[in-house]
Amino acid sequence: MAVTLSSREVATLASKDERTIRRWAKSGKLPAEMVLNKFNSPEYFFGLNDLTPDLQEKYYNQLRASLPEASVPEGAKPKAAKPLDTYSIDEQEEIAFWLRLVKRWQDYRNKPGANKTEVDARFVQWCKLEYPERAISVDTLYRRWNAMRANDLDGLIDKRGKWKKGKSSIPDPMWQAFLYFFLDERQHPLKKCYEYTKLEMQTSFPELVGDMPSYTTFYRRAQADIPEPLKVLGREGEKAFRDRCAPYIRRVYDDMRSNEWWIADNHTFDIITEGENGQRHRLYLTAFFDARSGIFTGCFVTNAPSSQSTLIALRRGILKYGIPENIYVDNGREFLTYDVGGLGHRKKKPKDGQERFEPPPVFERLGIHMTNAIVKNAKAKIIERRFRDVKDHLSRLFDTFTGGNVLEKPESLKFILKDGRIPLDSTLVETVEELLDWYFNQQPYGGAVAKDHGKPRQQVYNENLHTKRVASAEDLNLMLMRSSRAQKVTRRGVHLDIAGMSKL
């Protein structure tokens, strides 16, 4: 438990004015945590470990001086106290915890007219509620009090099991062989790793086999000494390590504006529908999603994701919410198309080194900056989490819900398909458009900005919309027009595709 001090206590230790300590905290000269008190005024709290060593020593000396002096029997020599800096950081924090707790206990039980036995019992009950992770009893308090009176800091530390900490009965060659089998992506069971280690020792170090520890010893050391990140990296691979254990940068949404970032992706409906020709299939949703508020801005239901479905969804979003500043997409062909967002990292250098002229893509004409996610990094696109809501709150409403995998597939699905009770494509399209606008976009906001929690997502969007770039339907007809690659004029002219017909 870390010890924290108020600005007044630090000023007393440093022999400075409290105003000086506050100024140091504001400037960052002295690390501090700022909180608002009940009068909505800032207060600063300082960790004891962040203070200089001389101030820490002064604090502990003052704390010890406030306790009753120890009565030393005649002829007995007081035990010499070890310097505080000989203890580790964790041990220093434990010492400070017991010094403060025992002092509080003594002040509590020494009040005039108090029954010490009842007071001790009540204080222990309070400790169980305040520090449930610690086993505190009356005997424990008395032992710590006697240690403090004897100036014995070792008596304030729980040293159970520390005499053998860092020691193991497993020889190092044997442990290294065990790690070789255990930290393998084939994920051998721990019991098998123990057996393989024993076989390896019989070949490489036969003199160690007779004193080989039991399986339980290997199990305990594997649980205690192998860090979880190392275990994930060795047994599950580098991607699992990056996803679950590696450091990451948290996105900050507080200063983000509505329409500053839109995120686009495609989602496969877990619903079987029937088209006009009687064909059964699963449709797709191409959607744009505002990162600040979490609303769906533009969507289009299609039977196959493509660059054209992306433009249709974008057009619907622009007509209703305006033109976004940035778009965050993955590396699919429906986004990395030469006349939509450009080829991005797919663009190849010409062999002759000369760049060919290409008309500006749609995103560039609209003034939209496109950012592509890192390959195989699906967690970066928060729209994937919204698609889970679409699956749970929309797809499950239909009788022909198929589930995302075989385990989720309803048993009654085959009977529904056999009876022909299959919804039409038009029914799904109408349901999706209504629910996205009037249900999903009106749900309470639960994103990263705490001050907006509980507000409807549409309200959050409106409150954070500072600038809106609009475009009329006529302008979008021109700005979203597809373009062809540059062609060389030959003796026969140029080749054009107009309304699906080839022209020369």
Image (cartoon, grey):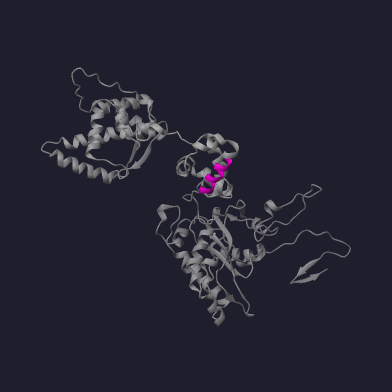
Residue furthest right in the image: 491
Q: Nearer the viewer, residue 336 or 88?
A: 88
Q: Main secondary structure of the magenta part?
A: helix
Instruction: Say which residue appears at 30% left-offset and 23% top-offset.
Output: 81
* Residues in magenta, as a range: 191-200
Image coordinates of residue 50 in percent, x first then y, are 39, 31
Q: Would you say 442 lies left or right of 499 here? A: left
Instruction: Say which residue appears at 27% left-offset and 25% top-offset.
Output: 151
Image coordinates of residue 438 in percent, x first then y, are 47, 69
Image coordinates of residue 97 in percent, x first then y, are 30, 35
Image coordinates of residue 405 in percent, x first then y, are 55, 65
Q: Nearer the viewer, residue 147 or 114?
A: 147
Q: Quadrant of residue 277?
A: bottom right
Q: Nearer the viewer, residue 40 or 227?
A: 227
Residue furthest bottom in the image: 419
Instruction: Please tell me whether residue 199 belongs to the stretch shown in magenta.
Output: yes
Q: Would you say 133 lies left or right of 488 here? A: left
> Is residue 323 at least partly visible in the picture?
no
Instruction: Say which residue appears at 85% left-offset and 64% top-offset.
Output: 493
Is the residue 239 above or below the residue 456 in the image? above
Is the residue 308 above or below the residue 418 in the image? above
Instruction: Please tell me whether residue 300 belongs to the stretch shown in magenta.
Output: no
Name the quarter where the C terminus is drawn. Answer: bottom right
Name the quarter where the N terminus is drawn. Answer: top left
